[in-house]
């Protein structure tokens, strides 16, 4: 029973990772940018919610809705000011630019909020504490269910958006061939800005869940980035549903690993990530060849 | 009435100069064939007209308006559409999505009229573009350009890599498009076809225009001479 419980908790944890990874996947899929500031943007979103909750006393979920337009504007500005310029200069510059952005965000947060560890778990009300005891060894937390459902809705909505709406087609067309997209009248700058705004908004949702389910501080970003990145790679770069599956797989690996020994939690996730890298990208042959 | 006016256009790729001081005037409703050997600068010229290549010097005027520095997507809404070399469809989008994603100016062409023009696309409507045959892909590429109801249609080697029967079908559709009064500049390797469909022929060599004239007035030998640079006009 403990293993079943571990898998179940892993799915809940994995849904959180999938939400974090979703925006990263969108930005990579549309613009081929690996956004190294993605985790920090999620944490920034968490602080935005935190500030609103502190000053108004509203529920974090409502505060998130208030913060959302700000994050969308931030995404637009980020694309039009920093990322667009860096995209013109080849593959390395966006990586360096987002790395720099990551450091800037961390230090601005440190300056404003101090290194204190915060959480919104207490403000979120009963959802963080209630759970159902299914059997003696199996319990389902309300928050886990909420995060899983939201993750499914986010991925489902994104799927519908990309496959059914003209803006979604424009995004896919630009992702596949930006030059040809311009030639049929698609403003690729605008599409990129919308994609980044979308990614930042979903990152902020990840930040909200981080703040509610555990704790955060100004330097939490990079850890979240690593888990999100692993989820994207495990699921296959640029694949939407792959990212959801990747997130769930990572979560399950971590909780099952922790079942064996609590110290193995993160390690088990990293091992799964490495195993996928080796199998999928022909690393076995390369490893064998170099070993010889 | 002049629709397109190109003045002293220079296009470069780094140190390579692909188009050198080209000046052209194209009147409303005209069909112009652009011919020349590989590397003569025909595709680059078309890309510069469509806004996909930023020229180094010179001016492009469309309907009297200077569009030299206007981005490609805005030129589409003015009525310039390019069918690029190699078709460049969006492979994961269906035929219909490929058509609908194109910005549409109001006019004669819609998804339905494009499908009427290319009946072979009707049964493929919901198929992903990657799974189409070369001829079907070319039809979608032309249809996608038509969706913006262009006043100036630029066609870059639409017969490249297609079976002769399919090329015939494409040119039959082209005749329908020309009948609508659309101004067309087309790049074509097949000299016979170019002379037949176009009212005027422009021959380029090493980035320059070496021969220009009404299709009817040009004999094959002169064109071939200019094409290969055998006799450079003084």
Image (tube, coloured by chain):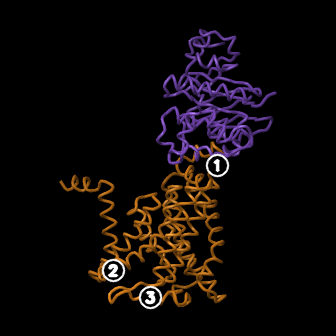
Chain colours: A orange, B purple
Mark 3 falls on what kind of element?
A: strand
Q: Residue at x 65, y 72 (%)?
A: A70
Mark 1 neighbour density, 10 Å: few (under 14) some (14–19) many (20 or more): many
Q: Residue A263: x percent and y percent?
A: 30, 81
Compared across the picture, whether B90 is left or right of A229 comes to right
| Image disc number at residue A186 | 1
Quadrant for the N terminus of chain B in the image: top right
- Asked if the residue at tag 2 contacts the one at tag 1, i.e. Cβ–Cβ closer than 8 Å, the answer is no
Q: Residue furthest left?
A: A292
- Asked if the residue at tag 3 contacts the one at tag 1, i.e. Cβ–Cβ closer than 8 Å, the answer is no
Q: Earlier in the sequence, mark 1 or mark 3?
A: 3
Q: Is residue B151 visible?
A: yes
| Chain letter for mark 2 | A
Q: Which residue position holds label 2?
A: A6
Q: Residue A88: x percent and y percent?
A: 57, 51
Compared across the picture, whether B44 is left or right of A143 comes to right
Q: Which residue position holds label 3?
A: A131
Q: Is residue B163 above or below residue A218?
A: above
Q: Nearer the viewer, mark 1 or mark 3?
A: 3
Q: Residue at x 53, y 35 (%)?
A: B136
Query: What's the CA distance linking mark 1 and mark 3?
Result: 48 Å
| Chain letter for mark 3 | A
Residue placed most toward the observer, B105 or A195: B105
Mark 2 falls on what kind of element?
A: helix
Q: Residue at x 33, y 55 (%)?
A: A281
């Amino acid at each position: 029973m403990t293993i079943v419980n571990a898998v179940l908790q892993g799915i809940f944890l994995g849904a959180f990772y999938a939400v974090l990874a979703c925006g990263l996947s969108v930005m990579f899929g549309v613009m081929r940018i690996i956004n190294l500031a993605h985790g920090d943007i999620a944490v920034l979103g968490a602080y935005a919610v935190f500030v609103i909750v502190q000053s108004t006393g509203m529920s974090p979920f409502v505060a998130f809705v208030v913060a959302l337009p700000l994050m969308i504007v931030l995404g637009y500005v980020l694309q039009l000011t920093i990322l667009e310029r860096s995209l013109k200069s080849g593959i390395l510059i966006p990586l360096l630019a987002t790395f720099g952005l990551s450091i800037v965000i961390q230090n601005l947060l440190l300056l404003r909020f101090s290194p204190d560890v915060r959480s919104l778990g207490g403000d979120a009300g009963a959802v963080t504490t209630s759970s159902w005891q299914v059997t003696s060894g199996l319990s389902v937390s309300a928050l886990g269910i909420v995060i899983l459902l939201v993750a499914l809705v986010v991925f489902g909505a994104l799927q519908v958006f990309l496959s059914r709406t003209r803006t979604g087609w424009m995004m896919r067309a630009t992702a596949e061939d930006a030059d040809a997209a311009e030639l049929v009248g698609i403003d690729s700058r605008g599409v990129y800005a919308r994609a980044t705004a979308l990614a930042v908004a979903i990152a902020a949702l990840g930040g909200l869940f981080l703040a509610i389910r555990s704790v955060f501080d100004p330097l939490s970003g990079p850890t979240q980035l690593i888990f999100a990145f692993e989820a994207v790679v495990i699921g296959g770069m640029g694949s939407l549903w792959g990212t959801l599956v990747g997130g769930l797989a990572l979560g399950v690996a971590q909780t099952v690993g922790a079942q064996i020994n609590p110290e193995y939690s993160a390690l088990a996730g990293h091992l799964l990530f490495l195993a996928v890298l080796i199998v999928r990208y022909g690393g076995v042959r390369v490893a064998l060849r170099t070993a010889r | 009435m002049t629709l397109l006016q190109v003045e002293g256009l220079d296009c470069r790729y780094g140190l390579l100069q692909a188009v050198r001081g080209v000046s052209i005037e194209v009147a409303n409703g005209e069909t112009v064939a652009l011919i020349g050997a590989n590397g003569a600068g025909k595709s680059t010229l078309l890309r510069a007209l469509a806004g996909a290549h930023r020229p180094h010097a010179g001016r492009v005027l469309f309907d009297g308006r200077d569009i030299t520095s206007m981005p490609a997507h805005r030129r589409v809404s003015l009525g310039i559409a390019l069918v690029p070399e190699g078709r460049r469809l969006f492979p994961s989008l269906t035929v219909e999505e490929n058509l609908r994603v194109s910005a549409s100016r109001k006019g004669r062409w819609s998804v339905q009229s494009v499908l009427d023009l290319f009946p072979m696309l009707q049964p493929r409507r919901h198929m992903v573009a990657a799974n189409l045959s070369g001829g079907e892909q070319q039809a979608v590429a032309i249809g996608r350009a038509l969706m913006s109801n262009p006043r100036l249609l630029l066609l870059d080697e639409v017969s490249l890599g297609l079976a002769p029967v399919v090329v015939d079908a494409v040119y039959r559709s082209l005749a329908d498009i020309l009948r609508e009064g659309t101004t067309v500049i087309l790049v074509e390797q097949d000299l016979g076809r170019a002379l037949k469909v176009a009212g005027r022929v422009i021959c380029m060599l090493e980035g320059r225009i070496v021969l220009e004239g009404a299709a009817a007035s040009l004999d094959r030998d002169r064109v071939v001479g200019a094409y290969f640079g055998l006799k450079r006009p003084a």
